[in-house]
Amino acid sequence: MENYPVSLIILNGKSADNDLLRSAVEMLREEGFTLHVRVTWEKGDAIRFVAEAARLGVDTVIAGGGDGTINEIATALAKLPADKRPALGILPLGTANDFATSTGIPAELDKALQLAIIGKATPIDIVQVNDDAFFINMATGGFGTRITTETPEKLKAALGGVSYLIHGLMRMDTLKPDSCEIRGDNFQWQGDALVIGIGNGRQAGGGQQLCPQALINDGLLHLRIFTGEELLPALLTTLTRPEESPNIIDGISSWFEITAPHEITFNLDGEPLSGQHFRIQVQPGALSCRLPPDCELLK
Ligand SMILES: Nc1ncnc2c1ncn2[C@@H]1O[C@H](COP(=O)(O)OP(=O)(O)OP(=O)(O)O)[C@@H](O)[C@H]1O
Ligand SMILES: [Mg+2]
């Protein structure tokens, strides 16, 4: 018999009750593929399942969920020894799915699952933050952070990605620019930022293109800072017509260091991390990801 690839799907419990996925899995098993399925209940479960996948020696760990699920799994993969690291596949089952959407992963579950199992594995960068945290798509700080970390589950379920923006606008009166200092290769900036986006990928917050030129396999991060005193006008022009905004500062570097006089919260692929100092460093080509051949985020 031919060597069929072996995969382990880690499914966010929120998305476990999905008949389409059940039949897609059954169909591929009938074709001869080995597919293990594990379901998470809370943060931390995915890490144990990644360890199990490494013990089983699977070819691919498939993240079934949104950006938070991909982050947890990619982080666990990055912490494995390189020679024991399975490839990453993606089944977009979250609310916003910014990484999956921007990398061109099909929204249809059966197609996405096929790609996750037999798609070409391409080395991509992952980004380390301080000692222990990682992101694969984007880190956002300032205004955007509060939007994504505080958007309640019910609003997210009803409205999807748009809820982040709506919820943020509703809370505008309580939001203020964050003061900070940012350094990178040939880059230094100090001031008040409304939103800081640091992209390995391009978009966050449900389709907001914060780093429209970023590539996930070039060893570089794209930084975009939105500045300004007036929150609403700045936010509206910057998000709708970024090229016309006087409030944008861009930078490119393989690392950035951010220091703030008070605690700020960064949102790493949807997962919050608070502190006053962030050292952000690319690990080039550290993850192998099954992506569509025409993925726009590859160089
Ligand atoms: N059954 C579960 N319900 C909620 N969160 C879970 C569950 N299982 C694991 N988690 C963990 O909670 C964290 C946040 O998950 P979150 O609800 O943001 O899902 P997500 O995959 O990012 O999808 P979404 O796009 O809806 O946010 C992730 O680290 C995830 O692994
Ligand atoms: Mg999330």
Image: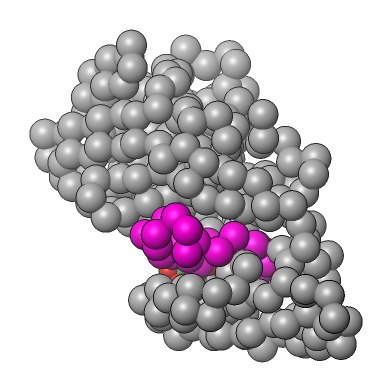
Is 109 situated above or below 233? Answer: below
Residue at 59%, 44% in the rendered image = 123
| Residue 218 image position (x, y, % from top left) | 55, 29
Q: Is residue 219 left or right of residue 80?
A: right
Residue at 52%, 16% in the rendered image = 245
Residue at the extreme left of the image, as rendered: 261
Q: Quadrant of the N terminus?
A: bottom right
Q: Is residue 70 left or right of residue 261?
A: right
Residue at the extreme front of the image, as rendered: 1
Q: Is residue 131 visible?
A: yes
| Residue 251 image position (x, y, % from top left) | 42, 19
Q: Quadrant of the C terminus?
A: top right
Q: Is residue 170 visible?
A: no
Q: Nearer the viewer, residue 32 or 93?
A: 32
| Residue 199 image position (x, y, % from top left) | 48, 36
Residue at 40%, 79% in the rendered image = 48
Q: How many marks?
A: 0
Residue at 23%, 19% in the rendered image = 190
Q: Which of the 4 image quarters holds residue 259?
A: top left
Q: Which of the 4 image quarters holds residue 27?
A: bottom right
Q: Is residue 238 left or right of residue 191?
A: right
Q: Which region is colored magenta?
A: 69-94
Q: Nearer the viewer, residue 189 or 217?
A: 217
| Residue 185 image position (x, y, % from top left) | 33, 17
